[in-house]
Every structure is written in C-alpha cells, then in structure tokens.
Image (cartoon, coloured by chain):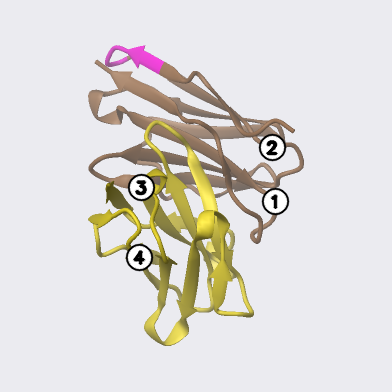
Chain colours: A brown, B yellow
Amino acid sequence: DAGVIQSPRHEVTEMGQEVTLRCKPISGHDYLFWYRQTMMRGLELLIYFNNNVPIDDSGMPEDRFSAKMPNASFSTLKIQPSEPRDSAVYFCASSFRTTGELFFGEGSRLTVL
Amino acid sequence: AQSVTQPDIHITVSEGASLELRCNYSYGATPYLFWYVQSPGQGLQLLLKYFSGDTLVQGIKGFEAEFKRSQSSFNLRKPSVHWSDAAEYFCAVRGAGGTSYGKLTFGQGTILTVHP
C-alpha cells in the first residue's frame, strides 16, 4: 500500500509568488495533518482535518496560508504571496482515528528567494 | 493546551552505551504519547506509542519508554546504542478528548550523536 504522497518534493520560488503543496493521504485514513519544520521552530502543527473538515487551524501563521481538503484523498496547502521566511520543509501526515499511528510523507522542501 | 518539552537539545553517547531521552508533557487528562525518529532528509517514523495499560511500552529497534503519570514524563530508553541510532528524536502528545481531540503536538526534538 502506498504511503502518504507529497508533491513537489522541492520547490524554489521567488518572493511574492504563489506556492501550492499537495498531499495524498493513505486510503482509509480520516485524519490529515500539515506540519512545518524549521531549525529555529522545530515541528509546528499548521492545521489538521478530520473527515475532510478543518478542526484546528490555529497554527496557520498568517492569512497568506490556506489549506483545503476537498475530498478524502487530497489536500493542498497554499501560500500566497510567499515570503523568504516561509522557507521550510512542509510535512503532510495521516492517521486512522486518534489512536492510529501518524504516517508522514517525505516532505516538501520550500525555498523562497 | 497540550505541550511537550524535551529538555535536551543534543545528546552524545558512545556506541554500546545506554541511552535515555527525556520527555515531559502537559495535558489535562491521560494523553496518547508517542516517540518518533527522523533521519536527515527523511520523514518521521514511529518508534513506539502509549495509550493505556502497561506503563512500560516496547517499540522497534530495541527502544522502550515508560509512562509516569506522577511526573508527566514519557522517557525513551535503549540499553545499548548502535551507530545507526544517530538521528533526531521527537516526543509527541495527542489529544484524547475535548477541544484538542486528535491534535498531535511535538516537542522540539533531541539530536542524538553516537561516537564509535
């Protein structure tokens, strides 16, 4: 069975551009998480969904960030406009119920110049 | 609000020595607790988890952790470290009820260096 799939794996863009990160969770999982990892701030939870509904988006840093989950097999994290301080690795993870293990994707490394 | 503290940013041990990584959590009830490991450039892999029952849990790669409610701790241990254990280790707490139901929060991580 395929794991959590994220795309793109690497993205280099210029300040002000729109960035869209994509995630396909494991089939059957009902929770989906977006995390951001930086050296300074560690692993930050940005937002998580349960059954495609956003439950907690308190970690989304600014209005420039938005996330959607239109169906159980796809989610996007969008940054518009992007800034250099958004440079980080963005991880998507999914799980089955609250007792299930979180499975992580390999991450999307974003560099904003 | 739930939170996790890993007091040690960086730990260095010799190969074959024992290891203990500390983790303290804050949560209003009995939490779900996890340890994950991350190798450079990789995603996170689950080492072990605690939900209820026996407070000493066994995980993969010879790791174990003990849940101590009185100390709000969930320390990770390994009796003999291998060079391949060098990585970053994350403790995490997951909300089991209330407004944080399902929310998984990570500590800052502990980087483990293993000397030959």
Residue B88: give its label: 3
Q: Quadrant of residue A108?
A: top left
Dots 2 and 1: beta carbons under 8 Å?
Answer: yes
Q: CA distance from mark 3 to mark 2?
A: 25 Å
Region in magenta: A11-16
Q: CA distance from mark 4 to mark 1?
A: 34 Å
N-term mark: 4 or 3: 4
N-term mark: 2 or 1: 2
The kind of residue on which mark 3 rests is: Glu
Q: Nearer the viewer, mark 3 or mark 2?
A: 3
Disc 2 marks which residue? Answer: A26
Q: Is residue A90 above or below residue A8?
A: below
In the rendered image, residue B62 lying in the magenta stretch gets the answer no
Q: CA distance from mark 2 to mark 4?
A: 36 Å
Left or right, A40 with reference to A57: left
Residue A96: give its label: 1
The kind of residue on which mark 1 rests is: Phe
SS at mark 1?
Answer: loop
Q: CA distance from mark 2 to mark 1?
A: 9 Å
SS at mark 3?
Answer: strand
